[in-house]
Amino acid sequence: MSLEIDEVDREILRMLQDDARISFKKIAEKLNLSEATIFVRVKKLLKRKIIKRFTAIISPETLGKNITAFVLINADPKKLQKVLEALSKIDDVYEVYDVTGSYYVIVKVRTEDQNKLAKMIDEIGLIDGIVSTETALVLRSIKEETRIKL
């Protein structure tokens, strides 16, 4: 489902994606609008869930999360919802996707080292309803984008 937004909202979103800390005053100046107008528009974008939240994007490696992997999971379909909930509660699981194809779930994990990764894979494998896992270790990240093209 795509929500309709006008070009002013698109420009606001582009600027916020470039720098979420940009002031409403600076946005208003660049768009030749009042600060109050920008405030109201951003509030509406938040209310409509077009903007989920404002956050800082942190480099995982600078905080010791040197290993990134994707764990591909086969699960008992009758227990899938509980599997998804359990995976979502694991600290170093950063993304959980319910997918189609050969696997039921794909999770993205980030951790300190291979030993911690091995422990995570073991922990994931012990979740009731998980039938099997396959892990793909990321050798290098070529593109990782958080921005949505507008």
Image (cartoon, rainbow, N blue to C red):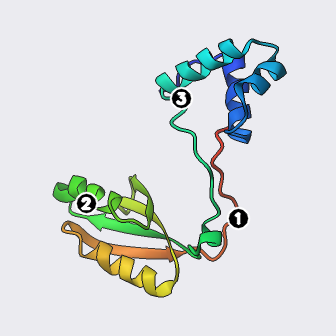
Q: Residues within 10 Å of mark 1 (few under 14, many from 20)?
A: few
Q: How far from the left and from the top, in percent, is residue 101?
A: 39, 57
The residue mark sitting in front, 1 or 3, is 3
In the displayed structure, does residue 66 sit left or right of residue 87?
right
Residue located at (44% from left, 75% from top): 135
**Closest to the observer: 104 or 121?**
121
Q: Which residue is mark 2?
A: 83
Distance between the Cα atoms at labels 1 and 3? 27 Å
Q: Is residue 150 visible?
A: no
In the displayed structure, does residue 97 sit left or right of residue 4?
left
Distance between the Cα atoms at labels 3 and 2? 28 Å
Q: Which residue is mark 3?
A: 50
> Against 50, is 123 above or below?
below
Q: Residue furthest left?
A: 78
Residue located at (25% from left, 69% from top): 130
Q: For residue 71, which quarter of the picture?
A: bottom left
> Against 79, is 51 above or below?
above
Query: Which comes sooner in the sequence, label 2 or label 1?
Result: 2
Query: Which comes sooner in the sequence, label 1 or label 3?
Result: 3
Task: Give SS at disc 2.
Answer: helix
Distance between the Cα atoms at labels 2 and 1? 30 Å
Q: Residue furthest bottom?
A: 115
Q: Is residue 138 visible?
A: yes
Q: Which residue is mark 1?
A: 142
Query: Which comes sooner in the sequence, label 3 or label 2?
Result: 3
Residue located at (66% from left, 43% from top): 147
